[in-house]
Image (cartoon, rainbow, N blue to C red):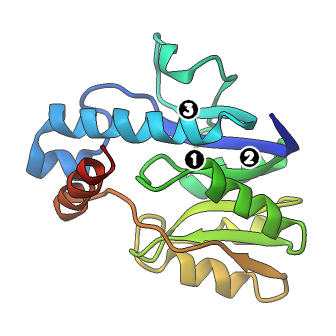
Amino acid sequence: MSTKGRLAVFARAPVLGAVKSRLAISIGEETAFNCYRKLLDNAVEAAMPFESEIWIEGDIVDLSWARGLPVRWQVPGDLGVRMLAAFSDGVKVLIGTDIPAMSASYIEQAFALLEENDLVVGPTEDGGYCLVAMHEPHDHLFSGITWGTDSVLASTLARAENLNVGLCDMLWDVDVEADYRRWLVSDQALN
């Protein structure tokens, strides 16, 4: 296990009807739920080599999918408030769960970049990010952001103008049906 700092996997409780709501509109709740579970399992697998914990939004009874990692509940508030709380608690790297290509090597890249930067971001093709890392919390990076839009990355980087910023490779996430279809093709190619 890497001891470079704490890693938080930010996840929603895997409950049918409570995850991937935008995706569920076009492919159905059960299919969207199954997609989320596979993506969540992938994120947990990627986090296993590190000092990881899972930060959950929502209620859940069965934690068998957490593979023994410590589980914390996210604080109430928007995504920025919740992420800031994790960094204020001492987390160094935070990842999401919607990224098919999330891997231990990608997280390792972020830790390596963090050695030389104040802030590390893993950009996504849709204008957001799938990973954020920092040595200490920077409150201004998490307030006034319109979460879930294509301006998240640009807004965050604009607020980070006085910080040394490292960028990981760009990845893509699964939010809508076109992403889901892309994931099916990539997932089948890997199997």
Of tags 2 and 1, the one toward the viewer is: 2
Numbered disc 3: secondary structure: strand
How many numbered discs, if any? 3
Gap between marks 1 and 3 measured at Cα: 13 Å
Query: Which residue does the numbered mark 2 point to in the structure image?
Result: 85
Circle 1 sits on which residue?
Answer: 77
Vertical placement of 177 versus 33: above or below?
below
Q: Residues within 10 Å of mark 2 (few under 14, many from 20)?
A: some
Tell me where residue 1 appears, x and y as whole percent.
80, 34
Q: Which residue is mark 3?
A: 56
Q: Is residue 47 left or right of residue 36?
A: right
Q: Which residue shows up at 23% across the image and 48% down it?
A: 188
Horizontal arrangement in the rendering, residue 103 relative to residue 65 (left or right) = right
Label 3: few (<14), some (14–19) or many (≥20) C-alpha neighbours in 10 Å: some
Rendering quarter of residue 162: bottom right
Question: Whole-percent x and y of residue 136?
Answer: 88, 59
Q: Quadrant of residue 180?
A: bottom left
In depth, the one of 183 and 144 nearer the eye is 183
Q: Secondary structure at mark 1?
A: loop
Q: Where the C terminus falls, by quadrant? A: top left
